[in-house]
Amino acid sequence: MKIKLDTESFNIIGESPQIREVFDIVGRAAGSQSTVMIYGESGTGKELIARALHLNSPRASKPFIAVNCAAIPHDLLESELFGYEKGAFTGAVNARIGRIELANQGTIFFDEIGDMPPPLQVKLLRVLAEREVDRIGSTKSTPVDIRVVTATHRNLEVAIEEGRFREDLYYRLNIIPLELPPLRDRKTDIPLLAGYFLNQFNGAGSTKTISDEAMNILVNYSWPGNIRELANFVERMVVLSIGSTITPRDLPDKVLGEVPKEKWTSLKNDSEPTGNPAQLLQQSLKQSFHVGIPDEGINLKKLVEDFEKELLIEALEKTGWVKNKAATLLSLNRTTLVEKLKKLKITNPPV
């Protein structure tokens, strides 16, 4: 049975063919009890997809328990998963229910299952086969009713060949494989995601936007950290960028160094601007600040101040923040430049 996903409720953003294919598989698999294995690079949103499977399943009102097998020390992972009885080992002063039992009637999500140590893989295999848990120090088994979802960024077939992952467990878990595409393979979703994160990180009274030129650079960047890296990047730019529009000048060298300057073009694929420097400046003003009066009007003073600030900072950066040279570049007196810097609260960047 295929169900319609409420993707907005758990922040899955995207309209590309690649992510729509993922939505289709989730919609078909969510209503079943089958185990799902989610593959994907770090930062692609594997836990969001796992939660989507749970929230769109008959178990939605029951617990969703997430376990990161790579984040919990191996010597503690067994007690975290299976629990223990009082007196099972030194320090076990009270009995504790493990996370597998906590997920009873719900869904348990094993993130980074490829990092689970082999001894625990054997115990997990028994849980999947018998649907019961043995707490550490217990003489009896506890039945559990769980739906299992796992995720990994590793190639488990290679891990099997190297003896790091059990083949029989792999076939138990890999019933419905689901591959999450990296962000670089779903470029059309990058503006949507960037817009979502802008809305999320813009503070009270802040309405920062990203210029078309800067957005085109972001679209062409490879995003090795995927969506997580994009979210962190947008938050940093909202905090550190000067002015109401994030432009290529605000982008870090890491991004600018990877994307050639010939790709610094508008997403609208407009023809290259022509004309003398004054005409080009006028075109830049329109493109950067979207001049054109809407029905609700504009704040002309703020628009002009933002553009003036952009020019002042660019002149200072071109001259190494030497005010005399920057004033000459802008055909201003040094005192006039200093007054403008004070008025617009522009200070030298920290060394």
Image (cartoon, grey):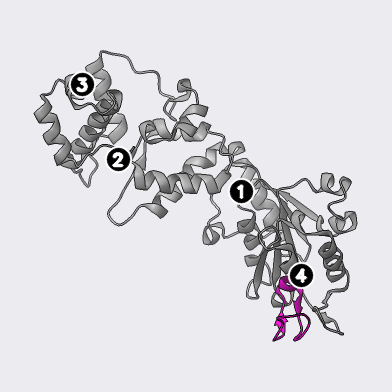
Which of pointers 2 and 4 indicates the residue nearer the eye?
Answer: 4
Mark linked to residue 77: none
Mark 3–mark 2 Cα distance, whole angstroms, equals 21 Å
Q: Earlier in the sequence, mark 3 or mark 2?
A: 2
Mark 1–mark 2 Cα distance, whole angstroms, equals 30 Å
Question: Which residue lies at the image location 66% right of the left edge and 69% below the top edge?
Answer: 65
Mark linked to residue 78: 4
| Picture coordinates of residue 92, whole percent (x, y) | 72, 82
Specify start and end residues of the magenta stretch as a single range. Answer: 79-99
Q: Please tell me how crowded label 4 is: few (under 14), some (14-19), or many (20+) other residues with Cα within 10 Å.
A: many
In what element is the residue under mark 3?
helix
Mark linked to residue 44: 1
Q: Quadrant of residue 298?
A: top left
Compared to residue 61, the image places residue 345 above or below, namely above
Q: Is residue 41 left or right of residue 88?
A: left
Q: Split into 4 quadrants, where in the image is the N terminus?
A: bottom right
Compared to residue 46, the image places residue 282 above or below, namely above
In what element is the residue under mark 4?
helix
Does 65 lie within the magenta span? no
| Picture coordinates of residue 123, whole percent (x, y) | 85, 68
Are the residues tagged 1 and 4 within 8 Å (C-beta)?
no
Q: Please tell me how crowded label 1 is: few (under 14), some (14-19), or many (20+) other residues with Cα within 10 Å.
A: many
| Picture coordinates of residue 71, whole percent (x, y) | 66, 60
Amino acid identity at mark 3 = Lys
Q: Earlier in the sequence, mark 4 or mark 3?
A: 4
Instruction: Give the number of callouts.
Output: 4
| Picture coordinates of residue 76, whole percent (x, y) | 72, 68
Mark 4–mark 3 Cα distance, whole angstroms, equals 66 Å
In what element is the residue under mark 2?
loop
**Label 3 belongs to which residue?**
325
Amino acid identity at mark 4 = Glu
